[in-house]
Amino acid sequence: MRIALFADIHANRRALEACLEHAQSQGANRSVFLGDFVGYGPDPHEVIDRVMAETAKGALAVAGNHDQAVAEVRETMTSDAERAMAWTRGQLDGEARDFLGSLPLRFEDGPRLYVHASPQTYPPWIYVNDAAAARRALEASRAQMIFCGHTHLMALHGITATGQLVSFQPVPKVPIPLPRHRRWLTVVGSVGQSRDGDPAAAYAVLDTERSDITHFRVPYDVEATASAILQAGLPPSLASRLLKGQ
């Protein structure tokens, strides 16, 4: 089975469509969505509609902190994120809100655990942004493989039976073996708001038979999405960071 892993779409319809199309070209036959479908971007309803359609066909989805914030759960956000969330709440109908509210915080699928952030106690939503955080995340679960987002950056961490941590910076298009005698945590990057200086969308494909994972970067019409952010009256900084990939 080839599983496409998508995180942090953030209401970016064009990036999502580009990644879904690319995943199909890679032979992916299952999709998993790791949360934060809304926030920042101009297309919350279109993104939720597409994710709902995918889950109706068997895809899995978990909630992110921005998804929970739609229900006005208190979350700590920047001022621009708060403004975007207030705007997002006004865009969503009851069906979309119910869908976000129905999402689990975690989903276990055999040896695989899918979460938005670190699989530690919620709240808070904990970033896996360095080796120490990766070790704590791996120690918080017994799953052989953990997949998450939240940082908007690609990363891969493994831990041996003796507790040695190994970390990799994924290179797009290069498969990374995931030996089954180790436990692994993959941060898949962001579909809708890259933060590593490359505006292209990011996602990953797990091959369960080969036990390897490949990260991909997918170009999309960033300029059109940035323009839509401005047209919606969202903070200009959100358009600027999209163009810069920061």
Image (cartoon, grey):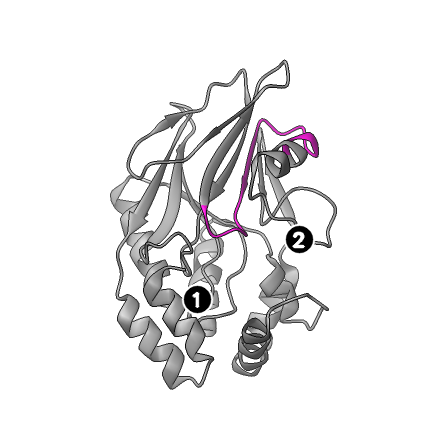
236 versus 174 height, above or below: below
Under tag 2, what secondary structure?
loop
List x then y, in percent, for residue 1. 40, 32
208 versus 225 height, above or below: above
Q: Name the mark nearer the viewer: 2 or 1.
A: 2
Q: Which residue is mark 2?
A: 125
Point out the tag, 2 or 1, that comes first from the N-terminus.
Answer: 1
Quadrant position of the C terminus in the picture: bottom left
Q: Which residue is mark 1?
A: 47
List x then y, in percent, for residue 176. 38, 27
Under tag 1, what secondary structure?
helix
Residue 38 forms part of the magenta stretch: no
Residue 142 forms part of the magenta stretch: yes
Q: CA distance from mark 2 to mark 1?
A: 22 Å
Q: Quadrant of residue 76?
A: bottom right
The label on residue 195 is: none
Question: On the rendered structure, is 102 left or right of 91?
Answer: right
Q: Is residue 93 visible?
A: no
Mark 2: few/some/many CA within 10 Å (<14, 14-19, 20+) = some
**Point 44% across, 52% down: residue:** 57
**Point 39% across, 78% down: residue:** 229
Q: Quadrant of residue 178?
A: top left
Amino acid identity at mark 2: Trp
Question: On the rendered structure, is 224 left or right of 146?
Answer: left
**Point 37% across, 66% down: residue:** 242
Please give the range of residues in magenta.
Answer: 138-153
